[in-house]
Image: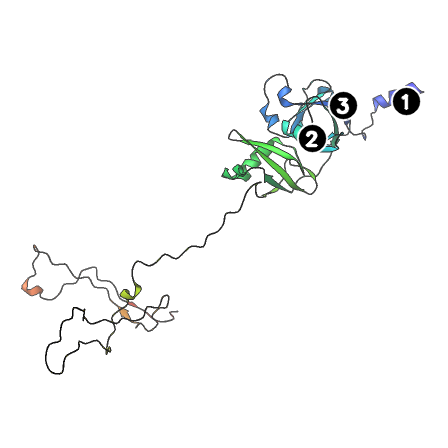
Amino acid sequence: MNFQFNGFNMMFPDHSRPFNTTYKCYSVSMLPGNERQNVENGGKIIMPPSALDQLTRLNVVYPMLFKLTNGTINRSTHAGVLEFVADEGKIYIPYWMMHNLLLDEGDIVEIESVSIPVATYSKFQPQSVEFLDITNPKAVLENCLRNFACLTTGDLIAIKYNNTTYELSVLETKPGPAVTIIECDMNVEFAPPVGYTEPERKEKEEEPMTIDPTELMPEPTGYVAFKGEGTRLDGKKKKDNGSNDAPIVQRQTYVRGIPDYDHPYGLLRFDRSVRKTEQNEPKPEDSKPQVSKFQGAGCNLKKNPK
């Protein structure tokens, strides 16, 4: 009876049991063969072929997502899988992921298959102010996240752009602390980088005017007090004491920013007279001033035009 029971389990495996096992963890640089920069600059891992064989026998939700946990300090993160070509009993993960889990080469890590929600929002904080030198950081981040499958709040991910590696801290993810970013519409925000200080705003000082605005005001018309020169009653000439007795022309007080509301309105004409030259002397019949053919048309200025 016991043999038949075990044979029954082998023919019909338990699909409700999740994938949960332990492996020795190594960085991608330890993977034999050609270098795989797409693994080092992403958020996916490489697992052994036996893991694929075991996953196909279980009821695993696709895409395959895993929770990696360092049991000694109870610290975890999430990742996707890129290939199943690792040596048996080993997995290869990006260096930044090993740094988050505080793992060394050959340490034991626990891997469990999980199902997490699709991301709708995430907030990142660059770890250096050099990240502000990127012209379009959102486009750069979107392109780099194509090599990622998951985001976990609290992780410190690394992206590479123009041969420079930038570290970003994942401050917040919605709708949960761990989300998948495969085929999703996700709103992205950036917090001020670490060490960034807001520049001080200096009030712009008004530059002094090179021209005295009172010189632009028209001369007063009509009676102006104390405009003439003084004379002696006995008819003698006034002694010249070296002082400048030129009449002082009083101008209107300059008031900035107030238009002349009393300016008369009506018909304006713009006439241009022909300039006289030595070669083109005026004829007797041209005693009247000539008017250019570019005589401007009149325009009727009215207050409150409709």
Q: Residue furthest left?
A: 284
- CA gap, disc 1 and disc 3: 21 Å
In the rendered image, residue 159, in percent from the top left (x then y), is placed at: 58, 32
Quarter location, residue 288: bottom left
Residue annotated with mark 1: 5
Q: Are marks 3 and 2 in contact (CB under 8 Å)?
A: no
The amino acid at mark 1 is Phe
Question: Mark 2 falls on what kind of element?
Answer: helix
Q: Label 1 neighbourhood size at 10 Å, few (<14), some (14-19), many (20+)? A: few
The residue shown at (27%, 65%) is 215
Q: Quadrant of the C terminus?
A: bottom left
In the rendered image, residue 275, in percent from the top left (x then y), is placed at: 14, 58
Q: Between residue 199 and residue 232, name the one nearer to us.
A: 232
Instruction: Mark 3 or mark 2: name the one nearer the start of the chain.
Output: 3
The amino acid at mark 2 is Leu
The amino acid at mark 3 is Gln
In the rendered image, residue 113, in percent from the top left (x then y), is placed at: 74, 30
Q: Between residue 187 and residue 207, name the one nearer to us.
A: 207
Question: Mark 3 falls on what kind of element?
Answer: helix
Residue annotated with mark 2: 101
279 relative position to 292: left or right: left
Taking 235 as reference, is 75 above or below it?
above
Q: Residue furthest top?
A: 33
Task: Give the numbered dot on residue 54.
Answer: 3
Q: Quadrant of the N terminus?
A: top right
- CA gap, disc 1 and disc 2: 41 Å
The residue shown at (9%, 64%) is 286
